[in-house]
Amino acid sequence: MAIRDFILKLVSRIFMPGLAKSMAEEGSFNFRSPDGSAGDFDRSPFIQVEDNGSDVTIVSFAGAAVLFAGLPQFEFRQMLKENDNNYNLVFVRDPRRSAYFEHPQGGPGGIDFYMPLVNETLEKLGSKYNVALGASAGGAGAFYVSSFARIDQIITFAPVFPPKLYIDPVNQVKSYFNLKKLFTEPMAYAEVVLIILAAHLVIWKIYRVHGKDNMPDITQCYLDVKPVPPRATIFYGERCLQDQAQAMYHKDIPTIHLRPIDSSRHNCAADLKKKGMLGKTILAEIDAGLTAWRGSKEVVPPAPNGSEE
């Protein structure tokens, strides 16, 4: 894990200094495997809770152990309160950087740790409507954990699943030899290349932990939710090859809404942030989900006795 962490630090500081600064401020570069047995180790590093007494809770799943779109926690919190709401906020981290597949102490069983951790937190908060939020690996984690947790809505930005789309040889060649992007948008080019390399590392790690034939299928986990999967939204950069392929892979699932963004970056949320639209976009999607949820809960009064239906 030390070598992978060193590479993550080095690459982040060279190509994404803003992200690296945020990770350092949040302590995400300093994660260590927890001590203690499975039943008694400290769980506080993996979840932080802000209880505002609201009926709505936002559960943010970090990607690469850093908060949403590389934002420091304070800035992220302020962004989610742009409409003066009092939503409860929950921040979940993945120190193993394995899209929540791996248990924090190592080995398989990530879902056996994160699902009850999230459910117990939501039960204590007592909220009626719960929203999972995540970007990149955090988006994959949001889908995965939400398929087993008490989540009513999922909002993601470029979630990296299924991983085969990111390591597909044809897509890789197209990305590596996209010279136009290299010279006109070098940051976006470097970002996509890094995501491809990171996907290889994460997949290798998950294969090693779960076995190649036992890797959970996030899409199928989501589809298996009964009675119906939660409302979900995937925002993606429409000029980012892998993310566009990921979105199209899910285009025929009626409960998943696709929202293309005018961006060539994998971190399309950062482009929205530059325009001052990220918080508004997330909160508008939550409002749409809340409206649909409240409509589904409305009780139609029975017809008066003797009247025709």
Image (cartoon, helix red, strand yellow):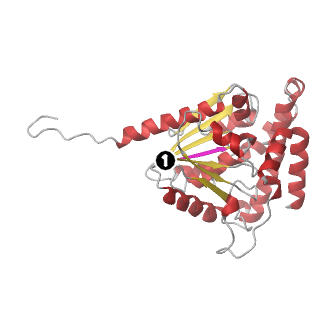
Q: Position of residue 285 (x, y in %)?
A: 54, 34
- Give the labeled residue for mark 1: 54
Q: Residue at x 67, y 41 (%)?
A: 76
Q: Is residue 286 left or right of residue 262?
A: left
> In the orientation shown, which residue stands out farthest toward the left?
306
Q: Write down the region rendered in magenta.
A: 130-134
Q: Secondary structure at mark 1?
A: loop
**Residue closest to the eye, 59 or 63:** 59
Q: Is residue 16 left or right of residue 227?
A: right
Q: Magenta stretch: residue 132 in it?
A: yes
Magenta region, mostly helix, strand or loop? strand
Q: Residue at x 63, y 41 (%)?
A: 156
Q: Position of residue 256 (x, y in %)?
A: 54, 39
Q: Is residue 195 left or right of residue 90?
A: right
Q: Position of residue 43 (x, y in %)?
A: 66, 65
Q: Quadrant of residue 81?
A: top right
Dot 1: few (<14), some (14–19), or many (≥20) neighbours within 10 Å?
some
The answer to whether one can see residue 216 in this image is no
- Counting the numbered discs, the total is 1
The answer to whether one can see residue 223 in this image is yes
Q: Magenta stretch: residue 199 in it?
A: no
The amino acid type of the residue labelled 1 equals: Ser
